[in-house]
């Protein structure tokens, strides 16, 4: 388990997170929702070690290998999709394995041969998702990962992500409660007062989330690539 206790972060003189308490299980998705500026992305960046809090603690991170899907795709524009993903994988992982996973995410065979700068926003997002979740990371932060993915392709991507998240600690930053339901996530809210996390959501309860943590502020197998 990863425990966040009394986490406080200020950025630019403004308190973004104020005394936040949260726990992430070893195997499960915790979805953080809330208004813009409530500190959702900041919380993920603290877990990734990219921001140091002013107060509070995060325990249980020792030994975790971390990966993320950021709000920006952060791809190497001149490389194709397979090469982008292979940058973060062991050399022995075959290109064909990576290509197969990208096809499962909905990329066409033609798209795999193009530099990612020529791909659509949804295709690029699929590459970013694969790059994070084909690693052996045990802690994954997904910050609005499904932005730009078309409605027709979204269910397939969500199913792939749900399978890939199994056995990991996952923090999902999202505004979409339907996505949290499909991933079986426990939902917490920032910026709406105090409470306790909800249980994993069903499709029927997806729109009944309640405040879960306190916050204030305005505002990246065998297949050898996936852990068992």
Image (spheres, grey):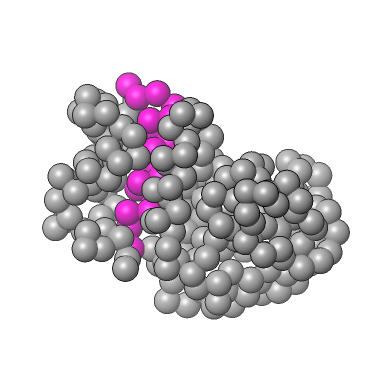
Q: Is residue 143 visible?
A: yes
- Looking at the image, residue 28 lies above or below residue 81: below
Principal secondary structure, stretch drawn in magenta: helix
Horizontal side, residue 223 vs residue 175: left or right:
left
The residue that appears at 76% across and 51% down in the rendered structure is: 208
The stretch of residues the image draws in magenta is 118-136
Q: Is residue 202 magenta?
A: no
User: x, y percentage for residue 218?
Assistant: 81, 44
Q: Tell me which corner region of the image, top left, top right, bottom left or bottom right, holds residue 32.
A: bottom right
Quadrant location, the C terminus: bottom left
Closest to the observer: 13 or 141? 141
Quadrant location, the N terminus: bottom right
Horizontal side, residue 149 vs residue 223: left or right:
right
User: x, y percentage for residue 58?
Assistant: 62, 73
User: x, y percentage for residue 20?
Assistant: 75, 65
Q: Tell me which corner region of the image, top left, top right, bottom left or bottom right, holds residue 66.
A: bottom left
Closest to the observer: 122 or 208? 208
Q: Is residue 120 magenta?
A: yes
User: x, y percentage for residue 5?
Assistant: 71, 74
The residue that appears at 59% across and 77% down in the rendered structure is: 59
The residue that appears at 79% across and 56% down in the rendered structure is: 210
Horizontal side, residue 161 vs residue 101: left or right:
right
Closest to the observer: 93 or 62? 93
Q: Is residue 43 visible?
A: no
């Amino acid at each position: 388990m990863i425990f966040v206790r009394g986490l406080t972060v200020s950025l630019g003189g403004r308190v973004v997170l104020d005394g936040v308490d949260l726990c992430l299980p070893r195997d499960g998705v915790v979805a953080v929702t809330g208004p813009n500026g409530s500190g959702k992305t900041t919380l993920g960046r603290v877990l990734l070690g990219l921001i140091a809090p002013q107060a509070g603690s995060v325990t249980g991170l020792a030994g975790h290998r971390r990966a993320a899907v950021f709000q920006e795709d952060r791809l190497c524009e001149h490389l194709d999709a397979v090469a982008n993903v292979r940058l973060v994988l062991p050399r022995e992982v075959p290109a064909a394995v990576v290509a197969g996973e990208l096809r499962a995410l909905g990329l066409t065979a033609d798209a795999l041969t193009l530099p990612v700068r020529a791909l659509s926003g949804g295709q690029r997002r699929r590459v970013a998702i694969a790059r994070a979740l084909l690693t052996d990371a045990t802690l994954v932060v997904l910050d609005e990962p499904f932005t730009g993915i078309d409605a027709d392709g979204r269910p397939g991507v969500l199913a792939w992500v749900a399978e890939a998240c199994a056995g990991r600690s996952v923090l999902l930053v999202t505004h979409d409660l339907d996505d949290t339901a499909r991933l079986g996530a426990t939902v917490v809210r920032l910026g709406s007062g105090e409470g306790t996390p909800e249980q994993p959501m069903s499709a029927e309860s997806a729109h009944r989330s309640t405040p879960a943590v306190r916050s204030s502020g305005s505002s990246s197998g065998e297949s050898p690539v996936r852990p068992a």
